[in-house]
Amino acid sequence: MTTQSEILHLKKAFLFKGLPDDVLDALGQKMIHRRLAKDEVLFERGDQGDALYIIDEGWVKIVREDSQGNEVVLNSCGPGEAIGEMSLLDQEPRSAGVIALSDASVLELKSDGFFKLIEQRPDVALTLIRSISSRLRFSGAYIQKVIEWSQKIAEGDYSFMDQAQTDMTVQTRKEEDKADQLLSAFVQMVKGVKAREENLQLQVEKLTLQIDESRRKQEFEELTGTDFYTNLKAQAQKIRQQRTDNQSS
């Protein structure tokens, strides 16, 4: 028997919004309550997708690795949000991993219980579609932001970095805001590009000074090596000697 407190927790979940208490009671009996410590891995990319999870408390991040093995944060999710449902639908391995951003608790629903729920309550499928639509909206905002920033970088404009929101622990539900916050890996990459660009500019300036100095030295040597300069130097010495002789007499 699911307790009233557990039913209230299920009601917070976007996926189960509007379901009557009797359905939530039956659902709660199929779910397993799991606790996660900060930085604990819930599942990894490539794992079998045999369950979905509803975040009860705390926040988690959805991550993948880039070609160099560095962590790339794709999204962050908080209380009431569902994660892992895509693998249940397409029967494919997990496309990303999930790691706790803080101490958290999740409700685990295995695939058999999930599909029984869909059969009994088709309206849950509609809610699931809305959840997937929200994810697509987030992806669209994410991609748009990357394109906008890439265009600015191409123009040498790094001013957007001052406004970039990179704190992943901020709890926001607006997809556009989350996209701004979760582009931390992109921002770090841009910082590296900017630093290399500034260093290259310093190196070019240093090289330019060296070239100018070398050119001036060469021009001086060319000038002092001419017959005109030799004659001019001899005449100057002669004039100085004459002045010295006149002062002595």
Image (cartoon, rainbow, N blue to C red):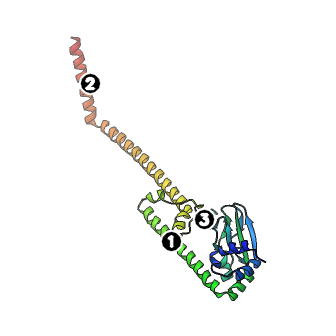
Q: Give how far across and how far down residue 41 sits, in percent.
A: 71, 65
Which amino acid type corresponds to the residue marked 1 in the rendered image?
A: Ala
Question: What is the three-letter code of the residue carrying label 2?
Answer: Gln
Task: Give yes or no for contact between labels 1 and 3 (Cβ–Cβ under 8 Å).
Answer: no
Q: Residues within 10 Å of mark 2 (few under 14, many from 20)?
A: few
Of labels 3 and 2, earlier in sequence is 3
- Pointer 3 with pointer 2, Cβ within 8 A: no
Note whether residue 84 is visible. Answer: yes
Q: In this view, does 23 lie above or below 32?
A: below
Question: Going by the image, does 123 lie left or right of 137?
Answer: right
Q: Real-space Cα distance between discs 2 and 1?
A: 79 Å
Q: Which residue lies furthest to the top in this view?
A: 249
Q: For this rendering, which residue is in front, 23 or 109?
A: 23
Q: In the image, residue 79 lies at what x, y percent?
A: 64, 69
Q: Earlier in the sequence, mark 1 or mark 3?
A: 3
In the rendering, which numbered label is found on residue 72? Answer: 3
Identify which amino acid the numbered label 3 is placed on: Val
Under tag 1, what secondary structure?
helix
Q: Can you tell which mark lies on residue 237? A: 2
Mark 2: which secondary structure?
A: helix
Q: Name the residue under label 1.
A: 141
Residue 218 image-quadrant placement: top left
Q: Where is residue 122 in the image (x, y as percent from the top left)?
A: 65, 87
Which dot marks residue 32?
A: none
| Secondary structure state at the residue bearing disc 3 | strand
Which label lies toward us, 3 or 2?
A: 3
